[in-house]
């Protein structure tokens, strides 16, 4: 008999380690097929909530934020690309040109969740692919609607969300909830609302942790 686990995947669609963490977690869940039954929800976290329209050059942004040099950034980008490749996720070799505000993407993810966890999962993956594989802006309205279409969701309904401020309050409340709970880095994977696994861990780490949690449950 399989054990039911609830997973809250706190992340941003502009976070490369979140793409890695999700691909890695999916591998772990495939290995645990039959042992655990998972209900996964994607919770909002904005890495750059104050980012103005048009975004910022990625090199400039990372230098300001972390004090890293362009050479260090190139090394890190290649390490991330290779890690993604090993998990079946494609990062563009040239990386990202700019970083953007992602609030509207989180509003769409909230809307998708109200339809089903599967719909939200599909949209999350479409948004990660849009930014990291295709190099398109998650701030751009048409890009967001293309991701909605790629996820098999209703584009007109998605357009209505973007044309209004629907779910803005709900997304901000959730963001505040996780920040007040001590989440300051993503991805943060919260299992059954009490076990925290942080970072883009290898599939083996997720697998062992989930097996342990399931056994205790």
Image: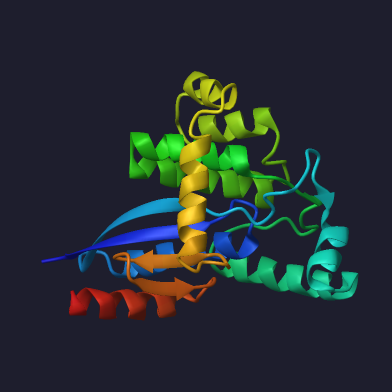
Give residue 178's position: percent from left, percent from top: 47, 59
Q: How many marks?
A: 0
Give residue 82's position: percent from left, percent from top: 66, 70
Q: Dividing the image into 4 quarters, which one contains the N terminus? A: bottom left
Q: Is any part of residue 23 visible from this angle?
A: no
| Residue 139 in the image: above or below residue 94 | above
Give residue 28's position: percent from left, percent from top: 38, 69
Residue nearest the observer in this picture, 157 or 74: 157
Q: Is any part of residue 217 visible from this angle?
A: yes
Residue nearest the observer in this picture, 60 or 28: 60
| Residue 74 in the image: above or below residue 113 | below
| Residue 40 in the image: above or below residue 159 | below
Question: Which residue is rendered at x = 86% and y = 67% of the image?
Answer: 63
Q: Residue lying at the far front in this picture: please name it.
A: 180
Give residue 81's position: percent from left, percent from top: 68, 66
**104 relative position to 37: left or right:** right
Q: Based on the displayed image, in which of its 4 quarters is residue 27 positioned?
A: bottom left
| Color encoding of the figure | rainbow
Question: Which residue is rendered at x = 82% and y = 57% of the image?
Answer: 58
| Residue 150 in the image: above or below residue 160 | below
Residue nearest the observer in this picture, 178 or 66: 178
Question: Which residue is rendered at x = 49% and y = 73% of the image?
Answer: 198
Question: Which residue is rendered at x = 26% and y = 64% of the image?
Answer: 33
Residue nearest the observer in this picture, 24 or 166: 166
Q: Dividing the image into 4 quarters, which one contains the C terminus? A: bottom left
């Amino acid at each position: 008999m399989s054990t039911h686990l609830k997973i809250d995947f706190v992340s941003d669609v502009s976070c490369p380690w979140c793409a890695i963490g999700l691909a890695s977690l999916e591998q772990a869940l495939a290995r645990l097929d039959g042992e655990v039954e998972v209900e996964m929800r994607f919770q909002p976290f904005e890495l750059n909530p104050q980012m103005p329209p048009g975004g910022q050059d990625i090199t400039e942004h990372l230098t300001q934020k972390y004090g890293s040099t362009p050479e260090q950034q190139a090394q890190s980008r290649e390490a991330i690309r290779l890690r993604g490749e090993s998990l079946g996720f494609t990062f563009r070799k040239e990386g990202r040109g700019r970083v953007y505000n992602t609030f509207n993407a989180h509003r769409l993810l909230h809307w998708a969740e109200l339809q089903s966890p599967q719909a939200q999962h599909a949209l999350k993956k479409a948004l990660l692919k849009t930014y990291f594989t295709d190099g398109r802006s998650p701030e751009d309205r048409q890009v967001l609607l293309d991701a909605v279409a790629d996820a098999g969701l209703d584009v007109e309904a998605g357009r209505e969300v973007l044309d209004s401020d629907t779910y803005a309050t709900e997304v901000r409340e959730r963001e505040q909830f996780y920040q007040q709970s001590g989440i300051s880095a993503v991805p943060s994977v919260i299992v059954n609302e009490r076990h925290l696994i942080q970072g883009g861990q290898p599939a083996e780490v997720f697998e062992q942790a989930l097996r342990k949690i399931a056994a205790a449950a």
